[in-house]
Amino acid sequence: MARVFKQTYTKPLPDGSEVITLRGKLYARYKNRQENTVRALLSRDGKRIIIEAKRWSITYRDADGIVRKEKGFTDKKAAEQKAAELERKAELGRIGIVDKYEEHTKRPLREHLDDFKTALLYRGNTEEYATLTYNRAKQVINSCGFVFISDISSHKVSCYLRDRRGDDLSMESSNHYLRAIKNFLNWMVKDRRTGENPVSHLSLLNSKLDKKRLRRALDVVDFIHLLTVTMGQPKRYGLNGPQRAMVYRLAAETGLRANEIRKLMSFVHRFQKPNSECFRNLREESQGRVVTAPCRHPGTTGTLHSR
């Protein structure tokens, strides 16, 4: 049978205390920090006072017959209800009916998210990818008001993404957020933290139908005009006009994206020859891979080599 009680602890007898007798027991009467007069039972040696904890505590026997102790509530009725619930679960455990996900169900989603990010890094993903996926899943969870696993609703996720698309979020970005929350919940299923993924049935949108951002390749005339104008522009983003023009030329001739070029700093790349048609990325070589990016014009690598 579960038992509800208040834990007690002792403290030194406060200065200026007055010892009184009440119903045959010795008490100390003193003023607390709020200058209110209070009394507390004295210990047997009369040198310390006995204080009751504010919360009720619960002891019960689990399904294996082991005595367990749980924190209750400041309200006794609520503590008694929790004690009855613990007793009921122990009884179900004794007859083989248990919730194997109960431990993880009690944990808030923010703790699971932290574990998810760690798992992404352990699987060999980059810090950038792990952080981006973590932040996207976290934004969906916080915006939908999810706190525990049981709160997750596919309808709320769909409505959130629909509203975001109404605020000019592209279909592709909407898909990224959906992938992030799906990956998080798939990981929870694989890690035996929950039995199902509530958003697994949600489908990605066809981003090709999204006409918000139309992109086209620059023709030769437009590209030469871009380089010419950029050469005479002031310093921006830490680069002067000629340096930015060089970056644009490198991107056009190698197909490297902005973030990939950003990582190619002068001390981590070299060129086979000043006028060669390709260069090698030492950052990749340090990871055991040799990657070459061809340049369409032999003069490009020579220009970069001279800088």
Image (spheres, rainbow, N blue to C red):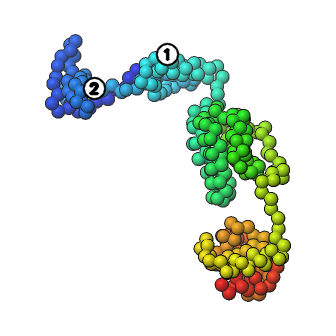
**Percent x, y for residue 298?**
80, 84
Residue 154, placed above or below residue 181? above
Regarding residue 299, the answer to whether it shows in the image is: yes
The amino acid type of the residue labelled 1 equals Met
Residue 143, placed above or below residue 10? below
Q: Do the residues labelled 2 and 1 touch (CB within 8 Å)?
A: no
Quadrant for residue 122, please give it: bottom right
Q: How crowded is mark 2: few (under 14 residues within 10 Å), some or many (20 or more)?
A: some
* Residue 1 badge: 1
Quadrant for residue 290, please give it: bottom right
**Percent x, y for residue 186?**
72, 42
- Which is more N-terminal, label 1 or label 2? 1
The amino acid type of the residue labelled 2 equals Ile
**Percent x, y for residue 256?**
75, 70
Q: Relative to residue 230, is residue 112 drawn left or right?
A: left
Residue at 23%, 33% in the rendered image = 12
Image quarter where the C terminus lies is bottom right
In three-dimensional space, the C-alpha distance between marks 2 and 1, rounded to whole angstroms, equals 27 Å
Q: Mark 2 points at which residue?
A: 50
Residue at 84%, 52% in the rendered image = 208
Secondary element at image label 1: loop
Secondary element at image label 2: strand
